[in-house]
Amino acid sequence: MAEVLVLVDHVDGAVRKPTLELLTLARRIGDPVAVALGAGAEATAAVLGEHGAVKVLTCDAPEFADYLVVPKVDALQAAFEAVSPAAVLVVSSAEGKEIAARLALRTGSGIITDATDLEAGDQGPVATQAVFAASYTTRSRVSRGVPVITVKPNSAAVEAAPAAGTVEALTVAFGKNATGTQVTSRTPRESTGRPELTEAAIVVSGGRGVNGAENFPLIEALADSLGAAVGASRAAVDAGWYPHTSQVGQTGKSVSPQLYIASGISGAIQHRAGMQTSKTIVAINKDAEAPIFELVDYGVIGDLFTVVPQLTDEINTRKG
């Protein structure tokens, strides 16, 4: 089968879940070849091999840590030229989309971003996307060059498929632009103990109806009972009730969890654009005419200050 390049998202050798999802999707269209870069790259091989990588190309160089984006593009291009892949898959993060776009430009290839599914086609991989603020679903394929596709987290279930996982060193010649933007400092993100918002399988979000920062602990308690991430609407963020880093929507983060619970969120198009591809959507709102009810799988018409604590208690009771 043709080989498919998968850029590995890892932290010091710990592979993040969206990469394992990419390997699952890559196996639908070919043999996955993983590209792991930076500190701990070789340590990723065991996990990648367990999830279908027939080969792991690794490179550790100070450029990956000291400079932004371009060194990784140089490395992915080197892998591209070494493998001649049928497609290139990248996690659909802000950095991932920039890397993918630069690679597509360098290789004269078409690019598809924010795919939510991928399947083999007679003329190349076919990607599913939610477009125009998730109002439409499209199926697309690249018609020029090698498809470069970024895939949203939670687009596929992780499936183990033991493969060789052979480790090979990747030789990279960094271009003159690789050192153009230097990292001057890093500040570790404060841990909440909850999953990363864009990668979480369950997200619980609060909106204007939460009516104040002092009430967001209700949303956090429900999220913690489910092992979920906490999100917020733009209205809640703009009011200063919750950090901007937790905003879900067109100008915030795009999420696609298995379960999305919207509490006190009316369902403005801006918010819907960031969560409409969720697999199951539940809304809690006392306004029966709220637009959010147009797209939910389950709707609860009621006061969130009554419903959310009862739901949290019931979940904790069943867990206990």
Image (cartoon, rainbow, N blue to C red):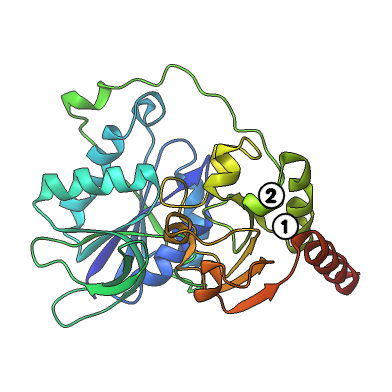
On the image, the x and y values in percent for residue 270 come to 43, 54
Q: Amino acid at mark 1?
A: Ala
Taking depth in this image into account, of 64 and 201 the one nearest to the observer is: 201
- Sequence-wise, the earlier of marks 1 and 2 is 2
Q: Which mark is residue 223?
A: 1
Count of marks, rendered view: 2
Residue drawn 66% across the image and 66% down it: 285
Question: Residue 142 vs residue 248: left or right?
Answer: left
Residue drawn 46% across the image and 52% down it: 249
On the image, the x and y values in percent for residue 26 come to 34, 69
Secondary structure of the residue carrying tag 2 is: loop
Question: Residue 151 vs residue 4: left or right?
Answer: right
Quadrant showing the C terminus: bottom right
CB atoms at circles 1 and 2 under 8 Å apart? yes
Q: Amino acid at mark 2?
A: Arg
Question: Residue 171 vs residue 281: left or right?
Answer: left
Q: Which mark is residue 12?
A: none
Relative height, residue 108 to residue 162 (above, below): above
Taking depth in this image into account, of 82 and 157 the one nearest to the observer is: 157
- Tell which tag, 1 or 2, sits nearer the viewer: 1
Question: Residue 237 vs residue 75: left or right?
Answer: right
Relative height, residue 289 to residue 172 (above, below): below
- How many other residues sit within 10 Å of disc 2, few (<14), some (14-19) or many (≥20)? some
Secondary structure of the residue carrying tag 1 is: helix
On the image, the x and y values in percent for residue 84 come to 16, 59
Mark 2 sits on what residue? 194
